[in-house]
Amino acid sequence: MTGYREFFVGKRTGTYGDTLAAVGLTKMLRALQGGDGSLVTVTEQSSRFCVELAEPIELNAERISILQREPLYSFIVTKPGENAPDGIVPYDYVANKAIADAYREERKRKKGGEEREELPNVSPRFYVYQKVNVLQGISARNKLLEEIVYAKPEELAQAVIAKLEALANGQLTSEAATKFNPKVAAVQVFNPSVGKGINRLKADGATRGPLPSSFVDWFEEWLRFIGSDVVLSGNSIGDDIKMNVVVPAKASYRHLNELEEHKFSYVRTSRKADILAVFDLVLFLVSKVDVSTDAFWSFRMQVGETPRDIFSAVQTAYFKSLGSAKPISNIASIGLPHWFKVRDEADIARWETLIKEHRDVLFLLDEDKTEEAELLHLYRDFLSGDDWLSFLRFLGSYGCWSMKRREAKKPMRSFVKNHLEELFTLSQPRLPVVDIINNSGFQNIAKAIRQATVSEQYVKAKGRQIFEVKYGLFQEIKRKAKFREELLTVISDFISQFNYENARREEQLREAPGRRRKRVSMQDLQEFAELMDRFPSQKETEAIAMLLIAFASCKDGKGTDADTDTEDQEVDLAYTSEEEEI
């Protein structure tokens, strides 16, 4: 009998339904190959996924019998008294819902100041199954599992072998005719392409209902059900639901198996949900594995890899509440970052530090407010598409926003200067960012802007203000960002005022002790002007302006407490590292 080593799942629908099928196939082949120690890898290609085994596998009825005893996904009991097929251990949705409800009540009691009692943990999969249940996907899963368990063994074996051979030959599973051919309902939560609202190219009579069940191949849906227990997660966005699926770029079954029990951050806004899902995956990849096969390296992300080399993206489907139903309204994909490759354990720590810092900064943004929603939108564009200009625009806009937050004495968090420098230096973006931030004229002007804004704003709050706080400076730089001559005028005027205030302060103090600021020299201004001459395009001029705001509004990071996140503490760090008592 011929052995097969590679199997292919086409990107037929262009949605996460294809990814679920590829992940499900990976898990199925590992089970058929014998489980522990079996190396199975799934790789994303341009128009399909390739699932590759370390050794060729012979498909026979004896192997397939494993799948009848254990179909590889859970039978979900949603009603008291409901029973799973014989020999199948069910997932008790009812019991987990009771625990989740008890947790909700306990949180209310805690807010009221009452003592909280210990409760058993809710299964990580419960909240996923809860959303699948709302989207009416559990019944189809359970029904197919029953069909598989109670099928005639020889018919099931023949059917599975035929379907797997079709995938090994690069064909669609629907092209393999089988005697065992159960009907499966078309469910949009597992295959978004079958959602309501699909019409013919010319609307000459297409119904408003879902695609017919004949469009759905039972084996492909089986693979999707298996894959959904591994890489499907979701968030409630008000009354709407957003489902996420992790897309493997080149991932082993070990990656996928460990991901199955991973708990993703739970947020109730769409943009933030996308960003935090990506952050969670990166932190998952830079964490240590429980059992390492290499005594010298115990991280999931290997030397020479970036997060996008393992998981390429998070695919999403947004189900909009229309009262009695939740049809699909949007399909999207958010890429994982590949800022820099891992060279050693220090790079693993850098990835972790950067992602945690960015997560902490973004977490306080309120997506219901227009300005903050736009900040999240800019960051998501940067994260997904490596759009570094979007990141610079985000940094500039965030600097303006944080200045207003400080003045209003509202909580905010700042980026750390040396972490930004590391990110730009290691990632080497297409924009000339590294050359800009290493220019001494740029550095001294950014430092002066920080002293005139963030630092003086802090000492004003403490009743120790000496110099004028330049409240509108960030906004003015941002407004003139695309116009070289106008931007130079804004910077020159600021330096003139800054140096005048410093000279007046020196005149007042003479030889007496007191707080002083270092003036910006003509050489600094000349180097800055030469920098702008080197990068004359509009995008480059904008990049310089946004970087000025970014480095003027971030905190120094020298002697910082990693847990510092309050407004006063952050700005105090900027003050103590920039100002001197003479």
Image (tube, helix red, strand yellow):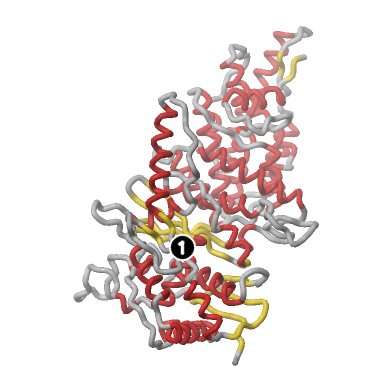
Residue at 79% x, 8% y: name it: 511
Q: Residue shown at 62%/37% (left/top)?
A: 415
Quadrant (top left, top right, bottom left, bottom right) of the C terminus = top right
Q: Is residue 480 visible?
A: no
**Which element carries disc 1, helix, strand or loop?**
loop
User: Is 242 or 96 nearer to us in this picture?
Assistant: 96
Amino acid carrying label 1: it is Val
| In this picture, residue 93 sits left or right of residue 506 | left
Find residue 256 and report its horizontal and vertical position in percent. Answer: 58, 62
> Residue 490 or 213: which is nearer the viewer?
213
**Which residue ends up furthest to the bottom in the rendered image?**
1
Residue that numbered label 1 is attached to: 89
Which residue: 43% across, 25% down?
114
* Tag count: 1
Foreground: 193 or 483?
193
What is the crowding at mark 1: few (fewer than 14 residues within 10 Å), some, or many (at least 20)? Answer: few
In the image, residue 57 sits, relative to residue 421, either above or below, namely below
Instruction: Name the quadrant containing residue 576.
Output: top right
Residue 163 is situated, as x and y percent measured from the top left of the image, at 47, 83
Give coordinates of residue 438: x percent, y percent: 74, 42
Instruction: Kindly tell me whether residue 157 is visible in this rendering.
Output: yes
Above or below, comparing residue 75 to residue 161 in the picture? above
Q: Pick the quarter of the image with the N terminus.
A: bottom right
Left or right placement of residue 501 versus residue 152 in this view: right
Image quadrant in which you'd find residue 190: bottom left
At a point 47% along the width and 54% down the height, the residue shown is 125
Q: Position of residue 198 (x, y in %)?
A: 29, 69
Question: Is 508 left, or right, of 104 in this rendering?
Answer: right
